[in-house]
Image (cartoon, helix red, strand yellow):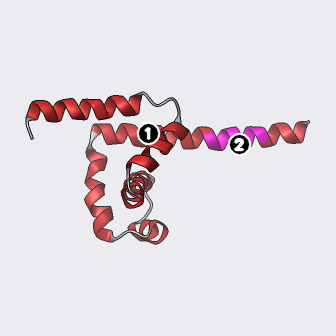
Amino acid sequence: MNPTLKKQIEKTLALTFSDFKNEEETLNFLKSFLTDKELETLSKRLSVLYWLSKKRTQENIKNNLHVTSKFISENENLLNKKEVKEVVKKIDADAWATKWSSRLRELLKTKN
């Protein structure tokens, strides 16, 4: 593929994702655009990266996500990339916020 064209279509893809209003809109697009297998693979890939960053064992990841050791190893190297580290940080921050938001709601329920 022509490098200029490649850059242009990659930019279009990135702009498409950045224009979504929320996660529901993004997920609806992904479910329409990707095959079930493609979406599952991307989701598992991101989960593997997150769980590796949380120091889960390969055995734990294999058992929970039903992936192979090879799949885990192939993705493990991505954790060294700056952009991937940033995404993992965002997932971690979201998980933390969700956990504490839930705890605070429960605490407020018991006080009322």
Q: Image height check: is 54 above or below 73?
A: above
Q: Position of residue 49 (x, y in %)?
A: 38, 53
Q: CA distance from mark 2 to mark 1?
A: 20 Å
Give the left or right position of residue 48, taking residue 64 as reference.
Answer: left
Name which residue type carries label 1: Lys
Q: Quadrant of the N terminus?
A: top left
Outermost residue, right side: 112
Q: Residue at x 9, y 34 (%)?
A: 3
Element type where label 2 sits in the image: helix
Element type where label 1 sits in the image: helix
Q: Residue at x 46, y 68 (%)?
A: 60
Q: Residue at x 25, y 53 (%)?
A: 77
Q: Position of residue 108 (x, y in %)?
A: 83, 36
Prevailing secondary structure class for the magenta stretch in the rendered image:
helix
How many numbered tags mark residues here? 2
How dense is the environment of label 2, judged by Cα within 10 Å: few (below 14), some, or many (20 and up)? few
The stretch in magenta equals 98-105
Residue corresponding to mark 1:
89
Q: Image height check: is 27 above or below 63?
A: above
Q: Position of residue 61 (x, y in %)?
A: 43, 65
Residue 102's label in the rendered image is 2
